[in-house]
Amino acid sequence: MPSHSVVREDISCPEQALQYETLFTIGNGYVGVRGLREEQETHPYFDSTRVHGLFNSVEGDLGPDLAPAPHWLGLTLEFDGHRFGLETGRLLGYERAPEPATATLTRRVLWQSPSGDVVRLEFERFASSADPHVLALRVTGRVLHGAPRVRVCGGIETRVTLPSGFEHWEPWESGSAAPDSVWVRSRTNQSGYGLAMTAALLTDLNAAPAAEADMPHPVVEFSAPLVTGQRFTVTKLVTLYTSRDSADPLADAQAALARARRAGYNALYSAHLEHWAQLWADSDVELKGDPFLQQALRFCIYHVLIAAPQHDDDVSIGAKTLSGAGYRGHVFWDTDLFMVPLLTLTQPHLARNLLMYRYHRLPGARAKARDNGYEGAMFPWESADTGSEVTPKWTPPDAKGKRIRIWTGELEQHVTSDIAYAILQYWRWTGDDEFMRDHGAEIVLDGARFWASRVEWQQETGRYEIHHVIGPDEYHEDVNNNVFTNRMARWHLEAAQQVWGWLSAQHPDRARALAGALTLDAAAFERWQHVIDHLYIPFDSARQIHIQYDDFFDLEPVDVLAFEPRVASLQTVFGFEAVQHLRIIKQADVVMMMALLGEQVGSPAVLGNNWDTYYPVCDHGSSLSPAVHAWVAARLGLIDLAHGFFEHAASIDLRDNKGNARDGIHGASCGGLWQAMAFGFAGLHLTADGFALDPHLPPGWERLRFSVRYHGERYTMTIEGGESRIERT
Ligand code: BGC
């Protein structure tokens, strides 16, 4: 398999350590593990491991957090009493790089201890994709000089806290079932999710392991003499279960450990590799001609794949995947509009799991609508396990104790149509009628009921408007008639009509049941049509452009491009208050509408005018923005600009060009990069009877090849030398 590795750690910059931890995350859709080093003794917080779904709220905190699981990576190696570490002895060689092709993190170190012994150490770790409850790490050592005694110690660190400092767990219990293994278990202290983890330390050395199950850090240790030239391996096998997936997490974790031991590291790793070979067979993208972008695409696909739940349709991917504490693990539109499409087209069963997460949260969305005086289902801006709105109302206090009110939980409402869009896209690409009949239709129809009740009739203008919202551009709060929100609401109502037409024709029983449950009667459908016909879509006929929202053009103009190049957002430069009065937009808003709706938005001239108006004032203060600009610019044939935005999006985590990669991978940007490649440069689009390409590749791209699934079949697209080919593979 070709190597997909894109990034090698530069240990000369300790300030980048947290960024590497994010980039080097491994995972399997159940658990994500940041790239902390095995021997690391001190850390701001041993925050390495996250499991989907374990949300917990702590009194005094700002909302639910994804509780960090115990830190299982720790392994200390001492050679004649000298502890291996990057700060001790001499580092004669060092290389650490993740391998997306195999979802493995490897490190090779050549180290001289303070007493002169020289050892070569090769570390390898993976989160099994074949059995998501199994994590493994192995160190292969070789003594090149000297004959030291090695002492090895590794266990489970339960002192895990998040940057906020809140404790999420009841006191941990621990124990040991064998001399070479330990276990821990606890429950989250508010939500009561149980978690149990076991760890066994195995070796081919002639050593007698001993477990010390004392809290807070139960360990196994052993020691053995080494001679020059000797090779040895130390393997740490770890298993975990939660009460979300087991009635008795400890018993299941112990049984899984027994199975893992029997199988052995090599067999576990082979099964993992086999699974990844299958994942890449569907999801790989080959881009010949630009090695950085080639690797960035694979890196981004990898990060979405390791975060996507494989066996669970009741959890979803947070904005920062499972790779960091950012946004507390909360789920935004990032998942539905940025990550789901990549999965819809390449791993549809994973996309379905994520859409089912929304389905299971319909009760929360209905409660939100009701509490706000609306009908139907109004999805929360930020979502966790319960389906209620979990957007914090305030930012944490800054150094002067100042907090800022966050309004998105109340006002950013477009997420309901975003979810419907993801469902329609999934249905059209997969042909999964069963999903639409049993689940998707209910979300789309109840979301349409929300919009029909949300719009406000304006007597004097004879039209519906939507007031008091935040659009994708979050720099401007509490605006009226955000064009993205209004246009997507109209799109949503039209989509609901189509879904209803299909459902009542193909599945009349289900249609009748839903009509009863959601009060879908003639009056409701008439209202939908009236809203579709009369919903205001802000448009300046003189200039032939859409208006981002009422009063947008009264904002003070700013020459945004004059601030390039920069890492800081213009919100940071001007301040949170000031930016609200300036004509600077945070991210693709009108441009986002163009990406999703394409030619439905207007004529080529209108699309071009919109682009010329909005792209120069975009700050890209959100990582969601550059990929969408690349996508739309490519559709408009602005290939140089598209290429520049694509590079920007590709660099967000790899080059940390938003300055916050330490908080976790920007999952939406990763999914957005794939969409910019497929829907932008390759011009992949649905047609009346299938799909087609309309490629516009940048000059240096010699070949672009990727696969998609359409109605269950895999097709591989190759664009090369001005020609394009679609083959069933
Ligand atoms: C963006 C939102 C996004 C959120 C989570 C915000 O900065 O403006 O569009 O959903 O981050 O990524």
Image: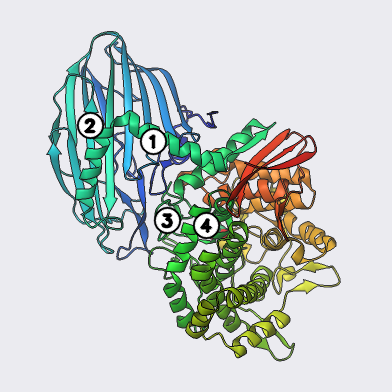
| In this view, the mark in front (1 or 2) | 1
Real-space Cα distance between discs 1 and 2? 21 Å
Q: Residues within 10 Å of mark 1 (few under 14, many from 20)?
A: some
Q: Residue at x 34, y 34 (%)?
A: 268
- 3 or 1: tag closer to the N-terminus: 1
Real-space Cα distance between discs 2 and 3? 31 Å
Label 3–label 1 contact, CB within 8 A:
no
Residue type, numbered disc 3? Gly
| In this view, the mark in front (2 or 3) | 2
| In this view, the mark in front (4 or 1) | 1
- 4 or 1: tag closer to the N-terminus: 1
Asked whether mark 1 lies closer than 8 Å to ligand 1, one says no
Residue, disc 2: 201
Name the quarter showing ligand 1.
bottom right
Q: Is residue 711 left or right of residue 382?
A: right
Residue, disc 3: 329
Label 1–label 2 contact, CB within 8 A:
no
Real-space Cα distance between discs 3 and 1? 29 Å
The spot of residue 513 in percent (x, y) is 49, 81
Q: Residues within 10 Å of mark 4 (few under 14, many from 20)?
A: many
Residue, disc 4: 335
Q: Element type at marker 3?
A: helix
Considering only vertical position in the picture, is 197 above or below 361? above
Per the rendering, the mark at residue 271 is 1
Residue type, numbered disc 2? Leu
Considering only vertical position in the picture, is 544 above or below 16? below
Q: Is residue 476 left or right of residue 408?
A: right
Q: Element type at marker 2?
A: strand
Residue type, numbered disc 4? Thr
Q: Residue at x 37, y 62 (%)?
A: 64
